[in-house]
Amino acid sequence: MYNKTIKELSLLLKNKKISVIELTKIFLDRIKASNLNAFIHVDEELTLMQANIAEKKIISGNNLTQLTGIPIAHKDIFVTRHWKTTAGSKMLANYISPFNADIVERLKKAGTVMLGKLNCDEFAMGSSNENSYFGPVKNPWDYSAVPGGSSGGSAAAVAARLVPATTASDTGGSIRQPAALCGVTGIKPTYGSISRYGMIAFASSLDQAGPIAKTAEDCALLLNVMIGFDKRDSTSLQRKNEDFSYGLKKNTKGIKGLRIGMPREFFNVNLDTDVQNGIYSALKEFEKLGAKLVDISMPKTNLSIPVYYVIAPAEAASNLSRFDGVRYGYRSKNYKNLVDMYKKSRTEGFGEEVKRRILIGSHVLSRDFYNIYYLQAQRIRRLISEDFQKIFTGPNSCDVIMGPVSPTVAWNIGNKRDPIVNYLSDIFTLSTSLAGLPGMSIPCGFSVNKPIGLQIIGNYFKEAQLLYIAHQYQNITDWHLKKPKL
Ligand code: GLN
């Protein structure tokens, strides 16, 4: 049962082959037996209450959606009523929000049953899930390896079949990279598509939520519910509703003539041989389906690392100033006066990486350095976006861009102690985020026992096209069905 996709489970539930309670219990038992550390918070009672409501809906046959009765879990960066929301931080270790994040509410209304809150890097800062106050998550393919980050819990839980699908967030790659390292499918839609209301802010001009699941089809079902205008988020986009599953159901016209750009800079750098081979074989499959591979250049790829690691910390320093020990979260026990209370609460409440970013962010925003770091980074950010537009709309334009998600497969826990080395692993995901474009990761092979992810990047609002292309690939390959020893 736990190997089934949402699409399959939905049918079984509707035809009453299994009840919501039975299904929910299967996953709750799996979570209890797992030692991946993927979940921070589980509350069977709350879960079973939701399962009961969904069960009643199914029995009555009213207000059913394809997600009614489907168990899911949320990255612990989305606030939830009644459940703790920690953002992977000691700062919020006991925080319970008085309201639900927009996507939590949307998925609840659609009838999903929430299994719990998923481990992640502290305030979503990281590429390996080792920065969580609640300890690292293990990669289900190899328990000594990282699952990727920051949505490591979200990806590991789907890969280990602890839950059919999860929510995640991507500021610079945190949906795509853990999806790649855990061998599951994840998509980050266009910036502004999914409301950021109730998503604990890291870098507001980059943060974007998205789903992780086993297949592109399942991601489409989730996006259908998650995407939508929300007036409580000033960057939320108002657009016509789109059915992301529609294209997948249609009589497939295939992808004949699809022009796939292969950025030179994504292939000739320090790319693991196995990863390179995996990506090339995937591209060959696309060629067999009738696509055309086009050599392109994204000359500013290398700059995306310094640009991102100036802008994201700058925004983080500003966003995290709200954690002062007064209004939210942790407050130091011993302090002399107000200023001392601020200092000690923040010193004791934040982890090392978060503090590092607050320092960098404050530095690049300071009067003497603002021009040379922050402003300059914003200028290059614009040039990176323009490079994408040249590829998507210029002469000899490409429909999509493909390449690796990560230069390597999952590395061992503890192996990248130097933060800079960690930052470098984001080389292929950051530019998409800086440009606000949609990007996804699909499984496309293995290096020994560790999964490889193929990245597909599209122009703004091309989520449906990305899902369609991924679906075509998943129709003729079975990488997405492979699972770790359970
Ligand atoms: N690895 C990147 C970082 O550490 C991206 C994280 C994310 O997308 N949330 O900031």
Image (cartoon, rainbow, N blue to C red):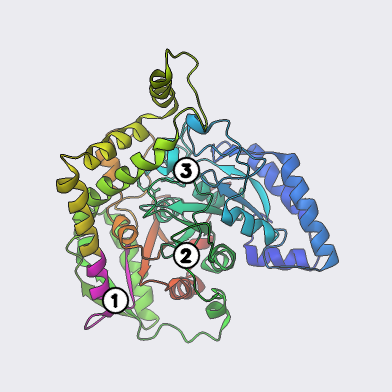
Q: Which circle marks residue 193 in the picture?
A: 2
Look at the numbered disc 2 and give the secondary structure of its residue. Answer: loop
Q: Residue at x 17, y 41 (%)?
A: 369
Separation of disc 2 and disc 1 at Cα?
20 Å
Q: Which residue is mark 3?
A: 139
Q: Nearer the viewer, mark 3 or mark 1?
A: 1
For the record, the magenta segment spans 385-403
- Mark 2 touching mark 3, by CB under 8 A? no
Q: Look at label 1 and name its amino acid.
A: Phe
Q: Which residue is mark 1?
A: 392
Pointer 3 local density, CA inside 10 Å: few below 14, some 14–19, many at least 20: many
Separation of disc 2 and disc 3 at Cα?
30 Å
Q: Nearer the viewer, residue 288 or 439?
A: 439
Q: Quadrant of residue 381?
A: bottom left
Q: Look at label 3 and name its amino acid.
A: Asn
Residue 351 versus residue 476 in the image, above or below:
above
Q: For the image shown, how many numbered marks are present on the structure?
A: 3
Q: Nearer the viewer, mark 2 or mark 3?
A: 2
